[in-house]
Amino acid sequence: MANTPQSKKRARQADRRTEVNKARRSRIRSYLRKVEEAIASGDQAVAAAALQAAQPELMRGVTKGVLHKNTASRKMSRLASRVKALNV
């Protein structure tokens, strides 16, 4: 348990940051789920639009420190290849 005023403040800040990061991660996952559902439906136009909407959210997660850059790039690459494969 935090004892000094500084450590109490840092604990409060950590709690606030945790809530913000949890909300960001949830938002990113929602966008990714929409892309997954669009891919499952088989409609490439809808899937491409969902992917276009998800890309800025993923990159925002990177800039905010929620995701690692390579993780976001890997997710985008794999989703893009799956969307591209729909029209074949």
Image (cartoon, helix red, strand yellow):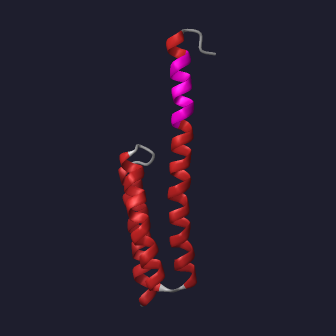
Q: Where, by quadrant of the figure, is residue 72 drawn?
A: bottom left
Residue 30: percent from left, percent from top: 55, 62
- Name above or below for residue 34 compared with residue 24: below
Extent of the magenta region = 8-17
Residue reaching furthest right? Answer: 1
Q: Is residue 9 magenta?
A: yes
Q: Residue at x 42, y 51 (%)?
A: 61
Residue 85: percent from left, percent from top: 42, 83
Residue reaching furthest bottom? Answer: 88
Q: Residue at x 46, y 73 (%)?
A: 50
Q: Is residue 72 left or right of residue 9?
A: left
Q: Is residue 60 magenta?
A: no
Where is the N terminus found, in terms of image quarters? top right
Where is the C terminus found, in terms of image quarters? bottom left
How many marks do you count on the picture?
A: 0
Which sits in the foreground, 41 or 57? 57
- Name above or below for residue 25 compared with residue 49: above
Q: Where, by quadrant of the figure, is residue 15 drawn?
A: top right
Q: Residue at x 56, y 53 (%)?
A: 26
Main secondary structure of the magenta stretch: helix
Residue 18: percent from left, percent from top: 55, 37
Residue 47: percent from left, percent from top: 47, 78
